[in-house]
Amino acid sequence: MLLLKCAIFLTVITSLLGEGCDKNGIIIYEDLGCTPHYDEGNDCPSKYTCEGLEPSSTSCYFQGKAYQDGEPVEDDLLSRSCNVGCFCSVEEKPGFVCAILDCPEWLGVRIEPGCYRNYTLENCCSVGEICPPFDQIEKCVVDGEEYREGEMFYVEKSCLNCVCRKGFKGKFEEPFCTRRKCGQQLRYADKIERHCAPFYGVDSDNDVVCCPEVDLFILADGTEGGESEAEADSCKFGEMSFKVGQEFEKFMFADNYGKTHEKVKCKCVTPPLMKCIKG
């Protein structure tokens, strides 16, 4: 029985930290509710199968579930996505309608002098303030930095969101840390269904990539090459397909914020989506 408990504990740690697989851009698949597939001897998924990557005229998809017109998304699935009250609408084309939270910290609302904002893993915004005296609060030390109970911290080279709370012993596991939530299908379902490629603002293939840059997907224009006939284990980009390891470059790519990137490199790493980074 003791061995079984240890095995479960190690599985939780491995799952949260990503164990080196996050450089492959896997968190977007977790966010889409895709199913991972593994090659023998490889700890990282070699590909995913996903529901909702093809256009539908009757349903919206979120985390692998089909929602019908007017059907709301469960509140527990929206935690930390900073979206509330989401429901499926097929009036023009299927997509989710959501209200976006305005956190007081984003609006510049000041806190009481000497206090700090209190966060939890379950909420997008702060849930109040913690004020002196601080004699009874927990303190967490991570990478030489000290955090107070209720403060957020991030683990280097990982896709974890963490909050200091009582009982933390230096292990990045629940209930202190959780994998990030991107909510891509809530806002960019049309780009995902058009097989656009998520763009990550990193410089190297070995850098950890978590959620794609906000509202940044690379659109196909027909100049990228690829094959018109899709193979079983390939990445789809627009109407074309690329085998694992194949890549292309785009030059002078202008993002939605008016910033021009001299070169963007896109590569098929883990199907079915391409992964794009700075060139």
Image (tube, rainbow, N blue to C red):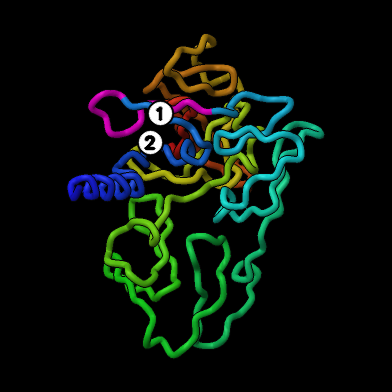
Q: In this view of the protein, which residue sits in the foreground, 114 or 75?
A: 75
SS category of the residue bearing label 2: helix
Residue at 80% of width from left, 32% of height from top? 92
State yes or no: residue 40 in magenta.
Answer: yes
- Mark 1, Cα crowd under 10 Å, few <14 / some 14-19 / many 20+, is many
Q: Using the numbered discs, state the Cα–Cα distance from disc 1 to disc 2 in whole angstroms.
A: 7 Å
- Mark 2, Cα crowd under 10 Å, few <14 / some 14-19 / many 20+, is many
Residue at 63% of width from left, 71% of height from top? 104
Q: Which residues are magenta?
A: 39-50
Residue 43's image quarter?
top left
Residue 46's image quarter?
top left
Secondary structure mostly seen in magenta is loop
- Kindly indicate whether the residue at mark 2 contacts the one at mark 1 (C-beta within 8 angstroms): yes
SS category of the residue bearing label 1: loop
**Residue labelled with disc 1:** 270
**Residue labelled with disc 2:** 24
Split into 4 quadrants, where in the image is the C terminus? Answer: top left
User: Which residue sits furthest bottom?
Assistant: 133
Residue at 63% of width from left, 73% of height from top? 108
State yes or no: residue 108 in magenta.
Answer: no
User: Which residue sits furthest left?
Assistant: 3
Q: In this view of the protein, which residue sits in the foreground, 142 or 49?
A: 49
Question: In this rendering, would 256 be left or right of 143?
Answer: right
Question: In this rendering, would 72 be left or right of 264?
Answer: right
Q: Label 1 sits on what residue type?
A: Thr
Q: Position of residue 273 (x, y in %)?
A: 49, 28
Q: Position of residue 14 (x, y in %)?
A: 29, 45
